[in-house]
């Protein structure tokens, strides 16, 4: 700042009174002329004396003239500055003025006086205001020439200020007082500036500035540091100034430097002196260009370090078993910058520890829990901030949650450790640093029923686990997994072969689900076995069937193998044996004959020798003739045959067919004692077929050896269809027996109902009455079929009349075996079939389907027949030999296929298929079912000697048909077998109902002589 500026500053601040600049008063006219002439002479003389040298003379500057006296500043005419007279008694400085010369002593003035003179002249000496320059002149005289200044008997201030106009004197004296006051306070003899740097750490520090006087300010500049405002240069004064080090990136060390310069004009015990030989000396403040203060400071060498930190994100949240764990690292520097040595960044080793497996997401913590399993360790060399990828050398070997923890060990870095601020370890269990190896749920199952019968509920018990490690958890609970189990009806009649693929002809019976909420044992919901054969379970886990949030935790879907032995149930086929003795009465020493028809065995029964899990077929039917018994009342369903007398025992193969017992000499049956005898057929059962035993109460399996000369009365034994659905035909059947049946006798069947079961039997008004059926001989007679439209109990009553219409024998309403229970059609579509079992080559065969349940509109039925060339049931397009015409189903009922004549001898399997109007399969039969097997023989089955036996007459009303020995007693309504013994006379005895003809039944001696063939 210039002196003029300083002057203005002080004037503005009000430290000096403002004085209007007047025009300096000129000398009187005469004096001026004298002085001018004198000055001209002096100049001429000087020019001769000095020759060509330039001469400078002091002259009056800004101030006041008064009576030839001047008060104010002089122009030095040397450097353009204003200076002030230091010698009050000396002549004016007119002449050759030289200078300035810096002096630090003037006469006897003290250094403080010099400092105050320097201060005042610096601040106000160059002013253009005469009131200011006059005050400066007074101040200089009072200090430099105090004796002369105060020698006039009055204050020097008052004396010399009189040189100024009276109007300005007060202002001048006020300015003088202010100058003295400020000079005494601010002038210093030795101004100074010092700097010091102190670093609190590697970056934060303080620059301390000390000045004398304290108010000095100047420009300070920092190197490798900045002030608090972010600048590296600023104007500051004395005090402590916070700074922050800013070393260059990557340097291992640095210094902070500071420098400062202050323009200290006006300070110090020194003056500029101008001299004119023999004249007054002129003094001025030291020129500003030579009065600056400067200082610098530098910190010691600051050694640097830096702190690398790591955050990571696994490359994949879910890692498949066998794949590598990969982590993606983001490296940053939280303190300093990455240090370089010799132009290259130092290498830092980051160590990643992969903890796991855990069965659920571990809880985040500062450190891993004690004993946490470690899967592996990897290292990554870091050379700066940025992104890195782990090597991927750790491979997922089992299910679980795996979490990374990355660390930097300072101590492990040797001579470079000093460049690391500290070690680093990130937190354990962070979700972003955790990968999941999905688990693989699987199940081992075992069928709960090794053996079952049609209609049984089949269940399977599965033991579920994870095959590749832990079963994972979420929020503390095991992740639920849905297992789907399908029970398949195995085609054919043999156990299934274990395979990864489901048999092409296997029929799914039902699919159930189990939601496993962790490893354990679970039992499936039931699936009903509709028919005989093997049923095998196949379990699977479908990812698509799981809740969406579960799917990622599962390694893959899983499927059980088909046909595993322990997962298979044998729904044993029921055997049906119908039989009829040739004669009811056999004389002592005579022969008894029986014809049995066996159905229900698989066509290959007797050929299966077992497979290690399933036992071999039992290939024997036992036929035992028990007797004699004194009374047929002993022949009950629950008769204990263990100690019963045995007439003879025969065996036949346990295979389908018609077997004639007693027809050869090797198996003749010859009773020798009178009494009642009964044939009992038994099968012990095996792993494919149910046990079977005919009832000792079966009246059609009895014969009687009467005493001589006895007569059998007329009697009627009946059996109604036990069950039927609404709209399904049902009927009643009667066995008429007796030695002498009156001529003209006839039989009438009546049906009552349907009635609720609870009130008991009601037979008031029949809704059905058969024709009068003529009875000419003992035999089996049918009522004809009827139907009802509502469910309930239908009670049958048979009446046997003579020619005059008198009742010979009549049933009782509600008698055992004489009730048909009619049920509502089931909701489910049910199809049962029964094919012709055996035909001779060239004869037609067919299949019959009984449809019950809800039949959708547009449903259709077709029958197919497949020829078999091996022991394994196959029903493929290559085996197909017959397809029936399509049959439109108009509701529940019985539907029959076209007749077909098979061209070759062999076994043929029938399969029925029901579809809806869109072609979707609603039902498909099982390939190889026994009731769906037709055997084509080359020659007819010829009976053995002694010729063909006779048969009981089988007649009836309407569509009467003879019941041959090969067919047994087959009820036309149900397509099933009508067994009389279990539900007829003995049941009536148990119910307390005994008819007269039953009481006389033991007198029966001869069976329908007209039907015998001797």
Image: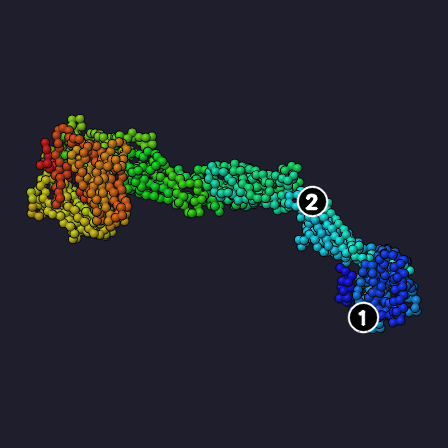
* Marker disc for residue 22: 1
Label 2 residue SS: strand
In the image shown, does 55 or 638 lie closer to the viewer? 55
Which residue is drawn at the image coordinates 16% and 53% (left, top)? Answer: 765
Mark 1: few/some/many CA within 10 Å (<14, 14-19, 20+): some
* Residue 565 horizontal side relative to residue 1009, left or right: right
In the image shown, does 327 or 359 lie closer to the viewer? 327
Q: Position of residue 616 (x, y in %)?
A: 29, 30
Q: Position of residue 152 (x, y in %)?
A: 92, 68
Q: Earlier in the sequence, mark 2 or mark 1?
A: 1
Which residue is drawn at the image coordinates 21% and 40% (left, top)? Answer: 883
* Residue 562 horizontal side relative to residue 439, left or right: left
Label 1 residue SS: loop
Q: Where does label 2 land, which residue?
A: 254
Q: Position of residue 655 (x, y in %)?
A: 23, 32
Mark 2: few/some/many CA within 10 Å (<14, 14-19, 20+): some
* Residue 217 horizontal side relative to residue 898, left or right: right
In the image shown, does 251 or 899 lie closer to the viewer? 251
Coloring scheme of the render?
Answer: rainbow
Quadrant, the C terminus: top left
Inspect this view and state whether residue 599 appears.
no
Gap in Å between the C-alphas at discs 2 and 1?
62 Å
Quadrant, the N terminus: bottom right
Q: Quadrant of residue 39?
A: bottom right
* Residue 738 horizontal side relative to residue 153, left or right: left
Which residue is drawn at the image coordinates 33% and 37% (left, top)? Answer: 502
């Amino acid at each position: 700042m210039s002196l003029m500026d300083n002057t203005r500053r002080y004037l503005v601040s009000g430290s000096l009174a403002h004085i209007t600049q007047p025009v300096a008063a000129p000398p009187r006219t005469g004096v001026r002329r004298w002085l001018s002439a004198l000055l001209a002479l002096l100049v001429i003389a000087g020019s001769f004396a000095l020759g060509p040298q330039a001469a400078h003379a002091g002259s009056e500057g800004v101030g006041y003239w008064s009576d030839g006296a001047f008060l104010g500043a002089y122009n030095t005419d040397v450097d353009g500055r204003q200076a002030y007279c230091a010698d009050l008694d000396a002549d004016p400085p007119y002449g050759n003025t030289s200078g300035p010369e810096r002096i630090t002593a003037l006469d006897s003035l003290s250094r403080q006086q010099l400092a105050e003179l320097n201060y005042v002249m610096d601040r106000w000496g160059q002013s253009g205001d005469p009131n200011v320059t006059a005050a400066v002149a007074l101040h200089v005289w009072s200090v430099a020439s105090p004796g002369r200044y105060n020698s006039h008997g009055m204050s020097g201030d008052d004396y010399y200020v009189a040189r100024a106009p009276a109007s300005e004197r007060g202002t001048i004296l006020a300015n003088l007082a202010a100058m003295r006051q400020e000079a005494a306070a601010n002038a210093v003899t030795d101004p100074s500036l010092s700097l010091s740097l102190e670093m609190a750490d590697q970056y934060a520090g303080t620059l301390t500035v000390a000045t004398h006087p304290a108010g000095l300010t100047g420009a300070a500049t920092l190197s490798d540091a900045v002030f608090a405002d972010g600048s590296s240069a600023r104007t500051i004064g004395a005090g402590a100034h916070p700074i922050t080090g800013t070393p260059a990136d990557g340097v291992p060390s640095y210094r902070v430097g500071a420098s400062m310069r202050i323009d200290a004009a006006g300070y110090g015990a020194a003056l500029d002196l101008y001299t004119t030989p023999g004249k007054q000396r002129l003094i001025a403040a030291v020129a500003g260009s030579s009065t600056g203060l400067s200082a610098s400071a530098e910190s010691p060498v600051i050694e640097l370090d830096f702190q690398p930190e790591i955050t990571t994100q696994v490359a994949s949240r879910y890692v498949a078993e066998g794949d590598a764990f990969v982590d993606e690292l983001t490296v940053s520097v939280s303190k300093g910058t990455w240090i370089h040595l010799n132009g290259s960044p130092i290498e830092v080793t980051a160590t990643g520890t992969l903890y796991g497996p855990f069965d659920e997401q571990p809880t985040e913590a500062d450190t891993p829990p004690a004993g946490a399993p470690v899967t592996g360790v990897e290292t990554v060399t870091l050379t700066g901030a940025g992104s890195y990828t782990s090597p991927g050398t750790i491979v997922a070997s089992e299910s679980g949650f795996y979490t990374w923890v990355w660390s930097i060990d300072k101590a492990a870095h040797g001579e470079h450790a000093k460049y690391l601020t500290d070690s680093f370890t990130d937190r354990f269990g962070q979700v972003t640093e955790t990968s999941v190896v999905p688990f693989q749920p699987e199940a081992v199952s075992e069928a709960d029923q090794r053996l079952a019968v049609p209609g049984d509920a089949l269940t399977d018990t599965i033991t579920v686990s994870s095959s590749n490690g832990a079963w994972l958890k979420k929020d503390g609970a095991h992740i639920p997994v849905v297992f789907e189990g399908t029970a398949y009806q195995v085609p054919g009649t043999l156990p299934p072969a274990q395979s990864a693929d489901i048999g092409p002809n296997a029929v799914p019976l039902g699919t159930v689900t189990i939601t496993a909420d962790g490893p354990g044992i679970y039992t499936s919901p039931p699936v009903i076995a509709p028919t005989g054969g093997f049923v095998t379970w196949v379990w699977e886990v479908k990812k698509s069937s799981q809740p969406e949030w579960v799917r990622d935790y599962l390694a893959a879907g899983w499927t059980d193998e088909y046909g595993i032995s322990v997962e298979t149930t044998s729904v044993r086929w029921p055997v049906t044996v119908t039989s009829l003795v040739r004669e009811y009465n056999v004389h002592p020493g005579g022969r008894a004959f029986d014809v049995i028809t066996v159905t229900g065995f698989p066509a290959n029964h007797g050929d299966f020798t077992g497979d290690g899990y399933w036992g071999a077929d039992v290939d024997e039917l036992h036929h035992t003739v028990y007797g004699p018994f004194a009374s047929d009342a002993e022949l009950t369903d629950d008769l204990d045959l263990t100690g019963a007398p045995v007439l003879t025992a025969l065996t036949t193969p346990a295979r389908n067919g018609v077997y004639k017992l007693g027809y050869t000499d090797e198996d003749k049956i010859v009773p020798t004692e009178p009494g009642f005898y009964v044939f009992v057929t038994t099968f012990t059962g095996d792993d494919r077929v149910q046990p079977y035993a005919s009832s000792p109460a079966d009246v059609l399996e009895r014969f009687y050896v009467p005493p001589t000369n006895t007569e059998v009365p007329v009697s009627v034994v009946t059996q109604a269809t036990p069950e039927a659905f609404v709209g399904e035909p049902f009927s009643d059947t009667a066995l008429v027996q007796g030695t002498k049946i009156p001529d003209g006798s006839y039989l009438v069947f009546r049906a009552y109902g349907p009635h609720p079961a609870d009130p008991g039997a009601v037979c008031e008004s029949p809704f059905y009455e058969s024709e009068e059926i003529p009875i000419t001989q003992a035999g089996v007679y049918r009522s004809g079929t009827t139907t009802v439209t509502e469910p309930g109990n239908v009670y049958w009553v048979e009446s046997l009349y003579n020619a005059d219409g008198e009742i010979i024998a009549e049933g009782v309403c509600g008698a055992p075996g004489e009730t048909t229970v009619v049920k509502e059609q089931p909701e489910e579509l049910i199809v049962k079939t029964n094919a012709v079992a055996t035909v001779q080559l060239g004869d037609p065969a067919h299949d019959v389907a009984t449809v019950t349940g809800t039949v959708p509109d547009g449903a259709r039925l077709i029958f197919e027949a497949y020829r078999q060339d091996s022991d394994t049931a196959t029903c493929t397009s290559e085996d197909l030999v017959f397809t029936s015409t399509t049959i439109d189903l108009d509701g529940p009922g019985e539907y029959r296929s076209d007749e077909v004549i098979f061209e070759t001898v062999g076994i043929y399997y029938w399969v029925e298929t029901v579809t809806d109007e869109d072609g979707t399969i609603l039902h498909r039969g099982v390939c190889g079912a026994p009731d769906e097997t037709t055997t084509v023989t080359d020659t007819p089955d010829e009976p053995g000697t002694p010729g063909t036996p006779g048969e009981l007459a089988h007649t009836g009303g309407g569509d009467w048909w003879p019941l041959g020995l090969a067919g047994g007693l087959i009820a036309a309504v149900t397509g099933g077998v009508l067994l009389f013994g279990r539900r007829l006379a003995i049941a009536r005895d148990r119910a307390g109902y005994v008819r007269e003809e039953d009481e006389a039944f033991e007198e029966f001696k001869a069976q329908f002589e007209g039907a015998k063939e001797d």
